[in-house]
């Protein structure tokens, strides 16, 4: 599919006055999203859904309260590991709630969206809302664009063969085997987000470092305080391992299928908004269970095109968007959950090839 991305990114060259025709072509491509937006708006899919979010957030709150109640009732027991697994799933749902709040899918105004995001992300999850929102906004603006999308910046993993050739030290070693190590590494993702959140408090881009720092500290004081008060040290450490490990896997299972393994945008490629979002995103097929588990992010193409669209509207938007892309001849990719992971892992293995072939 990468060759399709390059072909669609190239300027149009037509007979006659090439400069004028190229400008006309660019203007036409630029108007393509406007037409899709008109169809989506006329279908009423951008309207707020307060009842949906009241029920959804209420259910997650009740589940969280139930998990905490079970933790307190069980006391110092190895059965707490079942509670840890249950709370890992609930934390995944809380992360999706924070995501929807950040995109103003729940409230149209900034202040309630931000207040809800700080409560859910910082206080309940132990992750900085301000840091994550800044990072995620940059991802939405330039998905899969090396140098612009922080989600494909080389760190422990590499996302392109160009990054692989430049990798050194630990990333170079892990890059050789990153497809095999991907899911084991996800078990550390929850802790990694918390560590990055504390680290980001000193960044000039943080608007409320004192408030967020306070909320993060309160979260971990309560979290570890409760664990080591109720449980023996061994059980408490086991609880953390199960809870944080499964939470990281939940996050990775929701976010990794969306872009990993899709074409990377290289410097010099010029794509209009519609093509930039559609060609780099992947939808995941599934029924109501997948919708709940992935919080609507299985409709990743539609979410990237209309970030503020409420989750329950995405299913109808998918039908409209796919048909529209077919009219324009734009490749529209969707697959099953397991197949999406296979594509992502295949990509990770492929980009690590220079490291395996070149030795240390």
Image (spheres, helix red, strand yellow):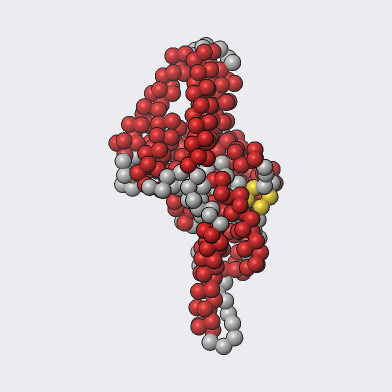
Q: Quadrant of residue 12?
A: bottom right
What residue lies at 33% left-to-right and 47% top-to-bottom? 205
Q: Position of residue 332 (x, y in %)?
A: 64, 59
Residue 62 vertical placement versus 24 (above, below): above
Q: Position of residue 168 (x, y in %)?
A: 51, 47
Residue 243 vertical placement versus 118 (above, below): above
Counting every numbered tag in the picture gives: 0
What residue lies at 43% left-to-right and 22% top-to-bottom? 224
Q: Position of residue 144 (x, y in %)?
A: 54, 55
Q: Nearer the viewer, residue 142 or 318?
A: 318
What residue lies at 53% left-to-right and 31% top-to-bottom? 59
Whether residue 91 can be seen here:
no
Quarter of the figure that contains the N terminus: bottom right
Q: Quadrant of residue 292?
A: top right
Q: Residue furthest bottom?
A: 16
* In the image: residue 226, left or right of residue 173: left
Q: Position of residue 73 (x, y in %)?
A: 52, 13
What residue lies at 61% left-to-right and 42% top-to-bottom? 291
Q: Nearer the viewer, residue 344 or 158?
A: 344
* In the image: residue 131, left or right of residue 9: left
Whether residue 273 can be seen here:
yes
């Amino acid at each position: 599919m990468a060759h399709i991305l390059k072909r669609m990114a190239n300027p149009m060259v037509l007979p006659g006055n090439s400069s004028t025709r190229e400008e006309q072509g660019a203007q036409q491509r630029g108007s393509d999203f406007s037409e899709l937006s008109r169809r989506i708006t006329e279908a009423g899919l951008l309207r707020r859904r307060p009842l949906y979010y009241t029920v959804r957030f209420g259910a997650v709150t009740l589940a969280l309260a139930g998990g905490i109640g079970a933790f307190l009732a069980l006391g110092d027991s190895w059965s707490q590991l079942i509670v840890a697994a249950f709370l890992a799933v609930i934390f995944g749902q809380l992360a999706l709630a924070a995501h929807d709040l950040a995109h103003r899918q729940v409230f149209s105004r900034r202040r309630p969206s931000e207040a809800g995001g700080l409560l859910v992300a910082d206080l309940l999850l132990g992750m900085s809302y301000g840091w994550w929102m800044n990072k995620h906004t940059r991802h939405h603006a330039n998905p899969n664009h090396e140098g612009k999308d922080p989600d494909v910046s080389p760190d422990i993993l590499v996302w392109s063969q160009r990054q692989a050739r430049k990798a050194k030290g630990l990333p170079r070693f892990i890059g050789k085997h990153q497809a095999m190590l991907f899911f084991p590494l996800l078990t550390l993702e929850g802790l990694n987000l918390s560590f990055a959140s504390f680290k980001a408090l000193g960044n000039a881009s943080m608007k409320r470092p004192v408030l967020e720092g306070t909320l993060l500290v309160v979260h971990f004081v309560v979290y570890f305080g409760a664990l080591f008060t109720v449980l023996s040290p061994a059980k408490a450490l086991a609880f953390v391992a199960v809870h944080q490990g499964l939470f990281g896997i939940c996050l990775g299972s929701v976010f990794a299928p969306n872009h990993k393994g899709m074409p990377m945008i290289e410097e010099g490629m010029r794509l209009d908004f519609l093509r930039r979002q559609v060609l780099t995103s992947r939808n995941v097929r599934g029924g109501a269970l997948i919708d709940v588990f992935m919080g609507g992010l299985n409709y990743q193409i539609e979410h990237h095109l209309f970030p503020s669209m409420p989750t329950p509207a995405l299913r109808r938007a998918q039908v409209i968007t796919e048909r529209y892309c077919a009219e324009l001849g734009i490749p529209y990719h969707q697959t099953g959950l397991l197949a999406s992971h296979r594509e992502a892992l295949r990509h990770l293995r492929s980009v690590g090839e220079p490291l395996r072939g070149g030795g240390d």
